[in-house]
Image (cartoon, grey):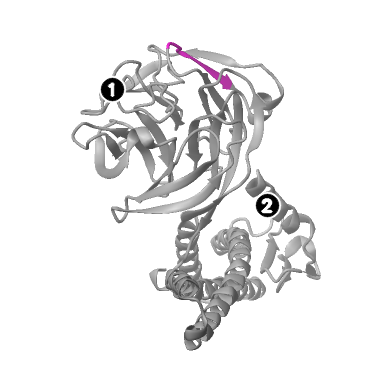
């Protein structure tokens, strides 16, 4: 919710808080009206261009092309504002961290010079900490370079805005093809930049935000990450077995404030709490089997079913809390995943990327983490994150990166507000974790650390 509030604040700032200088033509009805400003109160580039009435120059092909270019520039300006806000926010954190690192390095040198006067144990501890933190320094340098990259985007949009303003005074005086090429190039680079910002390494999880209190101790709830804009339907499944009724709430607001819902009857009962709704269909594990079923809500029919070969089921390789949670289906920025364990991998976690239409395995990764020792798990940007338990003090402590086939141990606190987590899934559209916590439906916002390398753009 915190991330949503930040985005809403940004939109309000752009729409209401920006001071613009208006340049009015002699005859507004026959000319372009250009509203422009180099920067707003926080240094962001803002440009707005209003076309003349549709009756003027409507048959002029060049005018139509120009209008399309103007719309592209306006869209890019809004994207850059979001990009700028993220980068500036993270840059403040980076600068503060950089000062702390360099201060620690100075302190370490002082201790090293006078190590004979210090206790050996303290000296070794500081040296080990410095060795751990020193690799972060070049990463921080890259982040400062990212801020310069965003500034470059802002300057290019300003230049394009100036060119378009001049073009409205003298049609044909500027090389249209060259102008179009510049817009397309900038748009592609900006899209690549925004795509890189969408993913990153998990560095923090907010406190739990309680959305509703309902149902039994176990269950799952979710929204569709591929639903059309404005569609916030909530899907709700109480229990972990012997149930086949899925509740559909029209919106998050309806889910929070009312008990009005539509009920969908699945052809088979589900197993565990690892269901996921993705692009209008629900994917679930059929009870007492290793069968994965894709059920289309629009047609109320099974559109595909496929066995997950060699996977355990019926409490063979479940999460630590039990509940027939052998197969956990989940979605991240990269698509559909299945998390399970096999005898061949000695009961350790297996990660499989699934094709959403055929349910065939695209690729699998075997890990060294026992499935029964995991409290819950979720995928973000191709990395599997595992919690150390489901009750009491909980943290995310293991991460497996499928892009490099490597793992690491981490330490990120996960507030277990109601003492028993039986479902934990990431939604890439909301950039939030959905959890079922002892009969409470809760959300967690996540913080992702990302570095954009300008040479890759």
Q: In the image, which residues are magenta?
A: 242-248
Q: Quadrant of residue 93?
A: bottom right
Find the distance from the CA under tag 1 to the CA under tag 2.
42 Å
Question: Residue 139 versus residue 120: which sits nearer the camera?
Answer: 120
Residue 335 among magenta residues: no
Viewed as shown, does residue 22 lie left or right of 421?
right
Label 1: how many Cα within 10 Å (few below 14, some 14–19, many 20+): many
Give the number of the disc on residue 446.
none
Position of the N terminus by quadrant: top right
Number of the label disc, if any, that sits on residue 6:
2
Q: Position of residue 62 (x, y in %)?
A: 55, 64
Q: Is residue 164 above or below residue 330?
A: below
In the picture shown, does residue 310 fall above or below 79? Answer: above
Disc tally is 2
Find residue 197 and report its horizontal and vertical position in percent: 50, 58
Label 2 Cα crowd, 10 Å radius (few <14 / some 14-19 / many 20+): few
Q: Residue at x 62, y 24 (%)?
A: 250
Asked if residue 114 is positioned above or below residue 214 in the image, the reply reads below
* Left or right relative to 405: residue 161: right
Q: Quadrant of the C terminus?
A: bottom left
Image quadrant assignment for residue 330: top left
Look at the image and tell me whether residue 157 can be seen.
no
> Which residue in the protein does label 1 denote?
290
Q: Quarter-wise, where is residue 99 in the image?
A: bottom right
Percent x, y for residue 300? 43, 15
């Amino acid at each position: 919710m915190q991330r949503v509030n930040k985005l809403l604040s940004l939109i309000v700032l752009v729409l209401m808080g920006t001071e613009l200088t208006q340049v009015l033509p002699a005859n507004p009805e026959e000319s372009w009206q250009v509203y422009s400003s180099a920067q707003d109160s926080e240094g962001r580039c803002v440009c707005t261009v209003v076309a003349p009435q549709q009756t003027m120059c409507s048959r002029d092909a060049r005018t139509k092309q120009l209008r399309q270019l103007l719309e592209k520039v306006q869209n890019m300006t809004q994207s850059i504002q979001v990009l700028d806000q993220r980068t500036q926010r993270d840059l403040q954190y980076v600068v503060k961290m950089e000062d702390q690192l360099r201060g620690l390095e100075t302190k370490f040198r002082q201790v090293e010079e006078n190590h004979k006067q210090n206790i050996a144990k303290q000296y070794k501890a500081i040296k080990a900490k410095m060795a751990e933190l020193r690799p972060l320094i070049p990463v921080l340098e890259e982040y400062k370079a990212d801020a310069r990259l965003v500034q470059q985007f802002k300057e290019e949009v300003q230049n394009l805005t100036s060119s378009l303003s001049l073009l409205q005074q003298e049609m044909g005086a500027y090389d249209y093809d060259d102008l179009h090429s510049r817009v397309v190039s900038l748009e592609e680079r900006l899209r690549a930049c925004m795509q890189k910002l969408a993913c990153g390494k998990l560095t923090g999880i907010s406190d739990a935000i309680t959305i509703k209190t309902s149902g039994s101790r176990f269950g799952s709830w979710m929204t569709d990450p591929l639903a059309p804009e404005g569609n916030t339907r909530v899907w709700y499944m109480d229990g972990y077995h012997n149930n086949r009724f899925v509740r559909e709430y029209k919106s998050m607001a309806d889910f929070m404030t009312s008990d009005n819902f539509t009920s969908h009857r699945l052809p088979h009962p589900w197993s565990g709490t690892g269901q996921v709704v993705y692009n209008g269909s629900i994917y679930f594990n059929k009870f007492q089997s290793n069968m994965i079923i894709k059920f289309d809500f629009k047609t109320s029919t099974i559109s595909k079913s496929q066995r997950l070969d060699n996977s355990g089921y019926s409490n063979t390789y479940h999460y630590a809390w039990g509940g027939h949670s052998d197969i956990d289906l989940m979605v991240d920025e990269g698509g559909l995943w299945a998390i399970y364990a096999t005898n061949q991998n000695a009961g350790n976690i297996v990660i499989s990327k699934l094709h959403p239409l055929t349910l065939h395995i695209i690729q699998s990764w075997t890990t060294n983490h026992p499935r029964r020792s995991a409290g819950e798990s979720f995928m973000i940007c191709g990395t599997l994150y595992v919690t150390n338990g489901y009750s009491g003090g909980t943290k995310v402590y293991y991460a497996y990166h499928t892009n490099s086939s490597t793992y690491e141990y981490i330490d990120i606190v996960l507030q277990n507000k109601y003492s028993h987590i039986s479902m934990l899934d990431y939604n890439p559209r909301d950039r939030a974790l959905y959890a079922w916590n002892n009969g409470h439906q809760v959300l967690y916002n996540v913080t992702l650390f990302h570095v954009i390398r300008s040479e890759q753009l």
